[in-house]
Image (cartoon, rainbow, N blue to C red):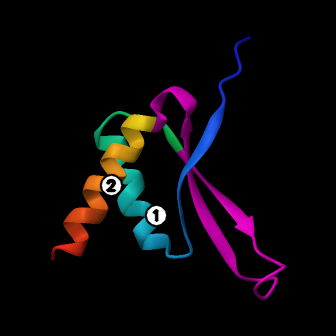
Amino acid sequence: MERSTRVSVYVSDNPSEIQLVKSKLDDAQITNTVENNYLTFTTTPTATSLKVMVDLEDESKAFEIIDAYLQQSENQ
């Protein structure tokens, strides 16, 4: 069984922003998952940060898509 290495390509505490990034990656047919991170050392224990994870081989393409999305949302 082959294990793939997963890497974080986007982190946010805004669930709607995470969903937008996730849908952009889905549209590009990049398999991705969302994971929670509990941030206990800098914030309250209930605050969570969400991470979008992709396979290592999709990392550079995912960053291109996310960069384009961020530039587009800055220009609006």
Q: Is residue 37 left or right of residue 50?
A: right
Which residue is painted at 20% across and 64% down in the image? 72
State the extent of the magenta-drawn residues as a range. 33-59
Mark sitting earlier along the chain (1/2): 1
Question: Can you say whether 61 is above or below 73 in the image?
Answer: above
Separation of residues labelled 1 and 2 (CA atoms): 14 Å
Q: Of the residues tagged 1 and 2, which is closer to the observer?
A: 2
* Image location of residue 3, percent across then percent down: 71, 21
Question: Magenta includes 24?
Answer: no
Q: Is residue 4 left or right of residue 14?
A: right
- Which mark, residue 4? none
Q: How many marks?
A: 2
Q: Secondary structure at mark 2?
A: helix
Do residues under tags 1 and 2 come within 8 Å of each other at their CB atoms? no
Question: Can you say whether 18 is above or below 1 in the image?
Answer: below
Which residue is painted at 24% across and 74% down in the image? 74
Q: Is residue 9 left or right of residue 25?
A: right
Circle 1 residue:
18
* Image location of residue 66, percent across then percent down: 35, 53
Circle 2 residue:
67
Question: Magenta includes 50?
Answer: yes
Residue farthest to the left, as pictured: 76
Depth check, front residue: 31 or 56: 56
Which residue is painted at 78% across and 88% down in the image? 44
- What amino acid type is highlighted by mark number 1? Ile
Quick one: quadrant of the C terminus? bottom left
- What amino acid type is highlighted by mark number 2? Asp
Which residue is painted at 40% across and 42% down in the image? 62
Question: Can you say whether 39 is above or below 71 in the image?
Answer: below
* Image location of residue 52, percent across then percent down: 54, 53
Quick one: quadrant of the N terminus? top right
